[in-house]
Amino acid sequence: MNKNTIAFTAPHFKATEAGQKILEQGGTAIEAMVAAAATIAVVYPHMNGLGGDGFWLISEPEKTPVGIDASGKAAELATLEFYSGHDSIPARGGKAALTMAGAVAGWQEALAVSQEWQTASNAQNLPLSTLLDDAIQLAKNGSEATKTYVDASKKTFVDLVSVQGFAEAFLNAGGIYEQGDMLALPVLARTLEQLAEKGLDDFYHGDIATRLAKDLASAGSPIRLADFHSYQAKRVEPLQVKTSVGTLYNLPAPTQGIASLLILALYDKLYTQGKTATDMAHLLIECTKQAFIARNQFVTDESRLAMDLASLLDDEQLEKMCHEIALERAQPWPHQAKQGDTIWMGACDSEGRMVSYIQSLYWEFGSGVVSPATGIVWNNRGSSFALQKGSLQELGPNLKPFHTLNPAFAELNDGRRMSYGTMGGEGQPQTQAALFSRYVYHNLPLDQAISEGRWLLGRTWGDVSHNLRIERDFADIAAEELVARGHDLVIVDACNELMGHAGAVVLHQDGHTDAATDPRSDGSAISGALR
């Protein structure tokens, strides 16, 4: 394989630039991803941040991929009694901020993997100050407010304007930024500088942890300093499934990675029934229904699992689900959807090492709680816990809530290796399946596989309805036939952000790379020879 080719994709071009810069300095795919993760926390602060979660899939050539679960657990004080008087956990404010932020610990654990790579070749990781420099400068000097940032601000203004720290950090003199205005985050810049100087562990065991714990407690959160001290990200064994085209990987519980694998494993058995793009979409939608039924029945905190999720991928189980799918008829879909909001990024370095990474606050701006001392906005992932005793998602200290987040990776039989993913709550497994199927099964170019009109069953980030939405350009081709098969359709504008921000990086057997990003985002993708 020819080396010295690199690739990076992110839903904001500044994050791609940060990743590219590190790759061109000889940094690893992991180091590039940490630089981009810090940067996108600054330029897309409504989507993700240091106060959120992260999940990694890391692939070194000829080795089984490594997963990192950097999702937060519920605080020690996060009990049913703490929420007495509530029917459900509040979605915003201090009581929504009940799970630890794992993203920074995930950066730390991933950099440890990177150092293991470097040690094997008598090299060292790049300094943390180098990795965080772009993020620091953008936080200090500002970046242009994007349309998606402005739209999120308008949508959440009423809910968040009075939440601790939100107006000071994310509003413009109490009002909403206009697209193109310069958004600076000076308090967050100082926090990033401190992390660069003292190390990422300061987030959990140093001055930053102390200040965060104090600010969260003052906002009404159950999180305390002891919760910071007891947290660590952990390496996990990815779920995998072998199909006719290769081996697919995703993350285990508490993520919906099993759903993403099930959709494609089912489609692998059924796709030859289809002849048209409409057939492809119909079969994928029906595969999605079967996958989500299984996901909703079983996925929870790892300690509560009633079964080994990998057993759902056994051939016998897949055949049972296939029997519920018909090419000419849609199954009814009464199931409640899960919402979510996030960013996905992919990387490949000059040694062929690849990363699929996802980072999130859950809803736009998470809980809305911003620590005045650090400028960090805290996630609201814990609001997906249930307060009903006996629920699969029942709240309890040190448990993890259900996560829509799931980065994907594939090793194809022809030697290609593919890092891919998207933001978009319920839409993540569906968009992964659409872009993968178009690219791998139906041989569309990578950028076209991502950009062409998509569909969404259930609810995506920032939305509440549960029917099947399809973008207008795809509806022109498929709507009439899908309705005839029994699908309850709503047509939305083409190139719609509701469909998520997808991306992919592919390393071919001869060493050349492809990368693509979603025109629905503010992203960019780079691939080619190392300069």
Image (spheres, grey):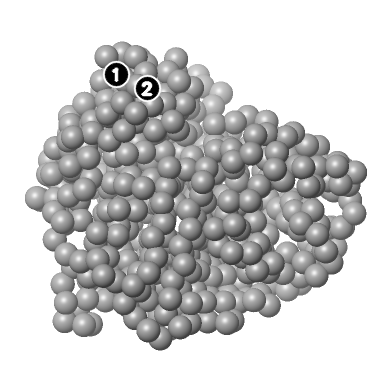
Residue highlighted by disc 1: 172
Type of the residue with mark 2: Glu
In what element is the residue under mark 2?
A: loop
Q: In this view, does 182 lie to the left or right of 457?
A: left
Q: Is residue 25 left or right of residue 259?
A: left
* Crowd rating for badge 1 (residues with CA inside 10 Å; few <14, some 14–19, many 20+): some
**Is residue 207 in view from this perspective?**
yes
Counting residues from the N terminus, which is met first, the one under dot 1 or under dot 2?
Answer: 1
**336 w.r.t. 427: above or below:** above
**Residue 343: horizontal and vertical position, in percent?**
43, 46
Q: Which residue is drawn at 46% across and 62% down?
A: 515
**Mark 1 and mark 2 residues within 8 Å of each other at the beta carbon:** yes
Query: What label sits on residue 520 in the rendered view?
Result: none
Type of the residue with mark 1: Asn
Query: What label sits on residue 178 in the rendered view?
Result: 2
Q: Which residue is drawn at 81% across and 37% down?
A: 488
